[in-house]
Amino acid sequence: MVNLNMNDQCPKYLFTVILLFGISQLSAQNVIPDKDNYKLVQNILYHDTTSKSIDPYKLERCRLDLYYPSNKTKFKTVVWFHGGGLRGGEKSIPDELKNNDIAFAAINYRLFPNVECPAYIEDAAASIAWVFKHIEEFGGSSDKIYLSGHSAGGYLVSLVGLDKKWLSKYGIDADSIAGLIPFSGHTITHFTVREERGIPGEQPITDEFAPLFHVRDNAPPLILITGDRELELLGRYEENALLMRMMKVAGHTKTKLYELQGFDHVGMLKPAFLILNNYLHDSLEIN
């Protein structure tokens, strides 16, 4: 585990403002170039459009935006899941990592109370599968796909990355993920999943919907990042510390935990993006 005091101002990354156009109803139609050789494809429906289970809410929420360098090939791609407690939030491309020779797929997924577990987990898996199957059409590499997200998004990243059944439905081995980098994600069963069952938020459980339930030695590299344990949401640092320890006990040699001292659950985002950026550019060793 690494304690980082990052009260110094983080470097600011130059980024290009992307103009967002109207939403296509059934498929992505808008490919928006900018002057710095990046393109943005908006609102791609990542579920099978021929499925009988497609309903209006699924059509609305199960979409992703793909931002990628148009003058590069074999680039890395981060699949990014927003936070919001599995009940709120909206897809966005992190400004801190734009114009950085890396592609981002920003994911929307269905939310409680419109759906319950495991619908949002199924959406996470379907969106990741879409990226694996289509990123090479845009010049990227399916061998360089990383998963990251904040809070509820971090929870989805850890669960789908550690429990192989979600991606196996699409013929994808979760071990082919290049790295898992969750920011302040639950590692026990998420509080919204517990609420659906009438379990209070102060009663932790660890079942099949907990990343901790799926500890294994052959998982992709795992970088866990949380805010300060005294400022984070209840128990969030301690959960991640337990996952880190149990992964190491199981024999996983590429798990690392960062505690960003002085930063709370939201404030930790900016320094966490710096860690993610360093990792993606091979300047951070985790073994």
Image (cartoon, rainbow, N blue to C red):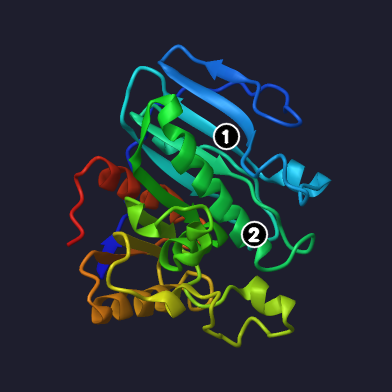
Disc 1 residue type (three-letter): Asp
Q: Please give the name of the residue rendered at 26% of the width and 45% of the height, measured from the top-left corner.
A: 278
- Between discs 1 and 2, the one toward the N terminus: 1
Q: What element carries label 1?
A: strand
Q: Number of numbered discs present?
A: 2
Q: Foreground residue, 3 or 142? A: 142
> Dot 1: within a 10 Å radius of its alpha carbon, few (fewer than 14), some, or many (20 or more) residues?
many
Q: Foreground residue, 227 or 254? A: 254
The residue that label 2 is drawn on is 120
Query: Which quadrant of the figure has residue 193?
Result: bottom right
Position of residue 111 measured from the top left corner of the image (x, y, whole percent): 71, 57
Position of residue 94 measured from the top left corner of the image (x, y, whole percent): 48, 39
Q: Foreground residue, 87 or 272? A: 87
> Dot 2: within a 10 Å radius of its alpha carbon, few (fewer than 14), some, or many (20 or more) residues?
many
Disc 2 residue type (three-letter): Tyr
Q: Please give the name of the residue rendered at 47% of the width and 53% of the height, measured from the top-left corner.
A: 171
Query: Which quadrant of the figure has residue 122?
Result: bottom right
Q: In this view, does 247 lie to the left or right of 128?
A: left
Q: 77 above or below 172?
A: above
The residue that label 1 is drawn on is 65
Res 7 seen here:
no
Query: Which quadrant of the figure has residue 10?
Result: top left
